[in-house]
Structure formats: C-alpha cells, structure tokens
Image: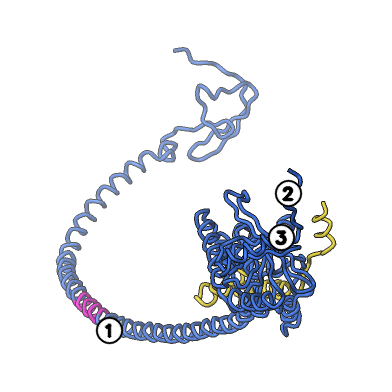
Chain colours: A yellow, B blue
Amino acid sequence: MANEITYTVAFEELQQIVRDMEDGEITVDELAIKVKRAAELIKVCKNKLTSTEEDVNLILKELEA
Amino acid sequence: MLENRQIFSLQQVVSSIRKTIEERYQSSYWVKAEMHKLNLYPSGHAFPELVQKENDKIVAQINASIWNHNFQRINKQFIQVVKEPLKEGTTLLLNVKVVFHETFGLSLQILDIDPNYALGELQREREETLKKLQAERLINANQLLDFPLLPKRIAIVSADTSKGLSDFMKVLNNNPWNYQFFTMLFQAYLQGDVAAPSIIEQLKRIEKVKHHFDVVVIVRGGGGEVGLSCYNNYELCKAIASFSLPVLTGIGHSTNMTVAELVAFRNAITPTELADFLLQTFHDFSVPVNDARKVIRTSSSRLLETNKQLFSAETKHFKNSANNYLLDAKNTLLVTSQKFKNEAKTLLTRNREHLHFAQKECLNYSNRLFKVNREKLAEHGVQLPLKFANRLVKEQQQVSEMENMVRLMDPKNVLKRGYSITTINGQTLQKNNSVEIGDTIKTVTFDFELTSTIIKKEEHGE
C-alpha cells in the first residue's frame, strides 16, 4: 500500500509540476530544481510500470493464517 | 368365506391399474413443477423427481422420466433459448403424460419442457436480484470505489483450464511496453450451479489478503455460453457489489448482461478486452509521464528563451535610456554652461561698469579733496610764517630770560662769589651724610680743588 501511495503521490506531484510549467507559474530561479525533481518523479513512475513487488508466498501464508 | 374370495395375480392388478389410468389419462397435460433432481443415467434417459413446494415444504411429489431422444431434443432447445441446460432446482412448465408401468409404477412421462417458461423464470430471478440489491443500495457500491491509478496487483478469480484466463494472461504478459502486473489465481467454478458459492468463497479469501491487491477480476470464456445464469445469483452479485476492491468482469458472452456484470466496477465483453482495459490504465499513467518529459523540456526552453528575450529587450531599453539620459544631461549642461557664460559676462560687464563709475567717482572726489586741501594748505602757508615769527620772538625772549636765571644759578657763579662745595665720597655733606674724624673730604672753590682730612668736628646747635 505504501508503494501505491508513493506512485500516486509521485504522479500527482509530477502532474502539478507540468501544470505549473504550462501555466508559467515557475520562475527561472526554480526551474533547475523543478526539472530535477520532475526527472526523479518520472523515474519513479516508470519503475512502477515495469516492476512488481508482491510475494506470492507471503500472501499464501496470510491466507492460511 | 375363503372359498368366495377372488384372487388376482399381481400382474392382473397392476395391469388393471395401468388400464384404468390409461383410460383416465389419455391426453398429455401441461404441469408446472420444480425439477428437484434430474437423475440423468448413462443410458441417456433421465428420471427426474418433480416436487411442488409451499413455504419450502414439499406438498406434492412424483417421479418422472424423460427418454433419451426427448431429453436430447429438450436440452438442445433449452441451450438454444435459455442458454442453460436443464438443471435441478428450477421451476419448469412440463408437458407430461401420466403413465403406469407394471414394474416401475406410476410416473409422469415428460414429453416436452417449455424453454420460454424457463427463460421467464431466469429473467424473474435476475429481476429479483436487481430489485434486492437496489433496495439494499448495493447496485453502485462497487462502482463508487476509487479506481487505483495503476491496477498492478490483480487477484484473478478463474479456473486454470479456462480459455478466458489464458487469453487474459496472454494480453497482460505479452504487452510490448513491458508493463509488469502481479497476478494471483483464485480457482473457482465459473458456470453452473456450483459457480456462485465457489466464486463467493474465493472472494472471501481475497478479502483476507486484499491489502496485496489493487483489483479483482473474474474471467471466464471458451466454455460456451451456457450455465451463466449463476451470474444473476443474488448472493454472488451481493458479494461482488459490496466487495471492498474494484471487481472487474470479463465473462465472455453475447447474451444479456448478467447482474454480476452490471454491479461490477467495470465489465468487459471478453477477458482479452478486460486485459486491454488494464493496459490502457497503464497507458493513461505512462503517457502523461512521457508527456511530462516533453512538456518540461519545451516549457523550460520556452521559459529560458522568454527570459532571454526579456533580458535582451531590457538591456537594449537600458542602453537607450542611458544614452538618452546622457544626451539630455549633456544638453542641459551645455545650456547651463552657456547660460552661465552669458550671466557671467553680463555680471562682469555690469561690475566693470560699476567699477569704472566708482573709479571715476573716486577720482573726482579725490581731486576735489585735493583741491580743497591744496587751497587750505596755501592759505596756511601764508599764515604760517607770520605766526611762526611771532612765536619765535616770544620763545627767544623766554629762552634768554631762562638763560640768565640759569647763569645766575650756576655753582660756578656762586663759587666766584666766594662760596665752596664740600663733598665726601662725591656727596655733599648733609645731615644724613655725616663725616667722622679722619675722613677725607674734598672742597671745590672757584679756583681750586682741595683735599682735607677731618681733624675736628663740631656740631652746630640749633
């Protein structure tokens, strides 16, 4: 669940940065920081698309409990 | 009495009953009854138990039979019209003939079953389920859940032999974008009477570990479009509608949508379409992420370009302003200096005139003063010798008078007349300048200067 929140948050933060940039809400001073942050967020999101973290054995154990 | 008895053989009796019944029930009848048990034998004949229930109590019961050829025909009709095979526990409209068999006894021979009546019964069950769920406000319950941004973790309710499952997995696993899903299969029967309790049980198991999953999918397909009325089962539909994760269905059929599909978060016609939907959600997530990269790149360069242009315009503006300012200042300076020059010249001229005038005034005045003084001087020059001569005579007279007096007073003249002056140590003898015997004194006369030693001293009495 924690991971889901992370990618949801990451996605929303990324969308916010994109909106701010499109609306011209970002100043030249912030630009470098925002672009760097966006790159990190894109990486997080991309990783989420192409990886899984659940463990079947753990779920089976919980089912038997 | 015993001799009077007429004894029948069993066969006689049974034959008589059969004859009576055959005479009495010559035609066939339409009967509404619940098929409690089908009892299909390998021979292809079925021997169903028919019952009538009132308040769950059996109030009538009779055995029936369907001969192989009738059964085949009826079942085919059912599957065609009802999309369900003949099944136990449903109320049917049967065309029957009352028969009595010498060895099998009384039974109803089923000649035909009206599939449309069965269809109506199923429809009624569907309506009832819908009505109940509506009353419990569960119809939209699952659809009101938040759908996860990325439905990555999927609990699959299906059977591992299902063609639908393999279609679903193929689409998920062979996606060219390398999207990764986590799937776990929860085995269940997917059609027929056993399906509803089986699926409900698996949903219960998923509920236990739901924190590991984002969505539940129920996929089925490839098994023909029969036995799907279980998806109208009230208990199953309630379990789906009230499930705490979004339940997606891909049951794969072309008939009317079942209640289960209706209450599911989302229904896809086929498992393949359902898998495509899941991939689409990944796209919906991925595309904005990819777009973000593009937007950020173009927005950044646009922002920089805009600022560069603004800066350049500002610089140009500043340069012009500065130049204009300098030019203005230069002009002002020039005008001021010209003005100053003129003012100074005027002032100088005026002062020079003042000076010139003052000089003239001064000269005139001094000349006048000169003249006056010269005249005064000339006047004085005339008077001075006269005054001076008078004064000189007067002065001369006074001087000669004083000269006489001085001459008379000169000690020399005194000495001439016989006086002398005695001194001691250069001092005249007086009271305070006493002499003692033995002192040397000097006496000056007109003709001599005498030095004496005191030999006697007598003081004058008064």
Of circles 2 and 3, which is in front? 2
- Mark 2–mark 1 CB contact (< 8 Å): no
Give coordinates of residue A39: x percent, y percent: 68, 75
The answer to whether any part of residue B110 appears in the image is yes
Is B356 part of what is drawn in magenta? yes
B392 and B124: which one is in front? B124
Q: What residue is shown at x 52% (from left), y 16% (from top)?
A: B459
B120 and B210: which one is in front? B120
A22 and B6: which one is in front? B6
Highlighted magenta segment, given as a residue range: B347-360
Q: Secondary structure at mark 1?
A: helix
Please, what is the dominant secondary structure of the magenta stretch?
A: helix
Q: Are marks 3 and 1 on the same chain?
A: yes
Relative to B89, B357 lies left or right: left
Name which of mark 2 and mark 3 comes first in the sequence: 2
Disc 3 target residue: B14
The answer to whether any part of residue B274 appears in the image is no
Disc 1 target residue: B342
Distance CA(mark 3)–CA(mark 1):
159 Å
Name which of mark 3 and mark 1 comes first in the sequence: 3
Q: Which quarter of the figure has residue A11?
A: bottom right
Name which of mark 2 and mark 1 comes first in the sequence: 2
Question: Mark 2 — on which chain does it sit?
Answer: B
B145 to B274, vertically: above or below: above
Give the amino acid at mark 1. Answer: Asn
Question: What number is the disc on residue B209?
Answer: none
Q: What residue is shown at x 17% (from left), y 64% (from top)?
A: B380
B360 and B288: which one is in front? B288
